[in-house]
Image (tube, rainbow, N blue to C red):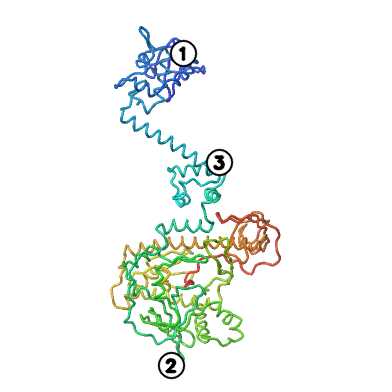
Amino acid sequence: MHVLFEEEGAFRAGTILADNETSLQVETVSGKRAKIKSSNVLLRYQEPAPGALLELAEKAAADIDSGFLWECASDGEFSFCDFADEYFGGAGHGASAVEAAALLLALQAAPVHFHRKGKGRFRKAPPDILAAALAGLEKKRQQALAIERMAGELAAFTLPPEFAPMLDALLYKPDRNRPETKALETACARSGLSAPHLLAKCGAIRSAYDYHYRRFLCEQFPRGAGFPEVEFPPFPDDLPLADARAFSIDDAATTEIDDAFSLQALPGGLWRVGIHIAAPGLAVAPDSPLDRVARARLSTVYMPGAKITMLPEAIVDGFTLAAGRACPVLSLYLTVTPEFEIAAHESRLEVVPIAANLRHHDIEPLFNERTLAAGLPDFPFRDELKTLWQLARACEGRRGKPAAAQGINDYHFAIAGDLGDPGACRVEISERRRGSPLDKLVSELMIVTNSTWGKVLAQKGVPAIYRAQTAGKVRMTTSPSPHEGLGVDQYAWASSPLRRYVDLVNQWQLAACLQGKAPPFKPRSELLFAAMRDFDLTYGAYAEFQRGMERYWSLRWLHQEARRSVEAIVRRENLVKLEGLPLLLRVPSIPEPKPGQRVRLAIEAMDFLTLELDCRYLETLGGAAESIGVEEEMEGVAN
């Protein structure tokens, strides 16, 4: 006697060796002896042999149509054996063991048509549920065909028509439940290409520049980078006019001019140094439509050849400290002794005339270490710059910290051409070492401004957002904590309100103090905490994007110049920095790399989509680099 039984969800056949009431000893097809429960036995039979039963049953089950089987089944719950007798049996005889097993396999293989109710027992699906399930199966079948068609088109580097409206989603936020995503993954697996590279070959990506830029917009500006229609607020018209002649110092491309300086002689050899900060906070009110725009962006986004401003152009144009007009400002006046000690300070809301916008490329050839040592030539604002530089040196000495790290360079990218066709653009990259007299002048006065105003807010008990550094870790906080890297007791970003939301918030708080009003943000304000947290995350994401775009244009420059080799400086281990470019990469082939070592590398490959640059070591060059300073955030240096 043989049995068909179920074990661990599978059907098995065996020969009975011993039959007890609740269990059986059986020998399976493999020769293994096993003890099974009687309740697991589905069928007892005489023939065929166990090894042939399931093989024959599977062949017979393949000829059974599940739809016809459903039509034949009764509405109630039934046993497969009883149903087999009805389906296969004739007058006077029931179904054979093979037929019964075949029906069991057919029922088990048709879960859409038949619902299992126990071991060997089933019930046919209700008509409405069956119809819905069959429709779902047909939809899946059609979807599978569509996926295969789209994958085939992609493999032939043809873009399926379904892809065009959803390219950004496929590239940057793929939904793996969508058939288009499944088709793309299938095609990538077959071709060995990544999704961006495959879609680029299909002509779906206009350029690598467009790919990186659109990814950033998708992540940070999902509704687009344009500004909504907002009402332009009136300019303050009741501010006193300052008795000062202010000038700014910025790069040539700067349009959001946040800060300017003035210098006046006082009796007794004293100086009055004015540091004037643009005051958009006098027109952009907290929780106004413009505030909500700035709050959503949190900072201006910078990239070579373009930028996305935090505030609309009309606001920037209205409050930028442009030469030839009087601008609303929040001014910090320092009373400075002949020994360049700061004897007193005063803050005012006022309008200051802007006499000039000095640009680095014009002033630095005239005002630098060499010309200061040799005696400055005659040029506008020469005396003011020299005095402010002397004050900056004194401030730096009192802090005991350099304002700008030596050995760290800034890079200026000039992109000539239409960014819609970046491959045809001309790239020029100029290198400028930090720590020049102009850098020192601006950065030290910004440090004085931000630390002084941070102290004013702290002493008045007015909440503000501070930049702190302890144990080498930089963080944002609402507590006036020390900034060890700058050597100041507190440091509140307040000098760039046109470009950073934190500075705008601090300007609101400070302006309220000067006007004798209640500050917009109260102690332990959830809105203040949220603004600080969101700014910290967003500012970091914007900086990462800027570095990525600088890397893109650096690769473009290498391609443009047809460079086959480059010189680099070893930073640590096999990490090197290319000379003249803000590019860091690892070169495993360098033998025994030492920090400061100069090497020549062969350029083997570059990828504009992944921003990867592959280089191979060629030779070690004579002479060590003068400095191997690692790029890092310099607090207080940004205007």
* Mark 2 or mark 3: whose residue is earlier in sequence: 3
Label 3 environment density (alpha carbons within 10 Å; few <14, some 14–19, many ≥20): few
Residue found 52% across the figure and 55% down from its top: 206
Relative to 93, does residue 568 appear above or below in the rendering?
Answer: below
Whichever of callouts 1 and 3 sits on the residue coming sooner in the sequence is: 1
* Label 1 Cα neighbours within 10 Å, binned few <14 / some 14-19 / many ≥20: many
Q: Position of residue 621 (x, y in %)?
A: 70, 64
Q: Is residue 406 above or below residue 115?
A: below
- Whether the residues at callouts 1 and 3 have beta carbons within 8 Å, the answer is no
Amino acid on which the number 3 mark rests in the picture: Arg
Whole-angstrom CA distance, mark 2 to mark 3, is: 82 Å
Q: Which type of secondary structure does the marked residue at label 1 adopt?
A: strand
Q: Nearer the viewer, mark 2 or mark 3?
A: 3
- Residue 456 in the figure: left or right of residue 182: left
Check residue 302 in the rendering and tell me which mark sits there, or answer none: none
Q: Is residue 490 visible?
A: no
Q: Foreground: 536 or 247?
A: 247
Which three-letter amino acid code belongs to the residue tagged 1?
A: Thr
Residue corresponding to mark 2: 267
Residue under numbered circle 3: 190
**Seen from this angle, which residue lies furthest bottom?**
267
Please state the horizontal and vertical placement of residue 494, each as a whole percent of the image. 41, 72
| Gap in angstroms between the C-alphas marked 1 and 3 | 48 Å
User: Label 1: which residue?
Assistant: 15
Can residue 442 be seen here? yes
Asked which secondary structure carries label 2, the reply is helix
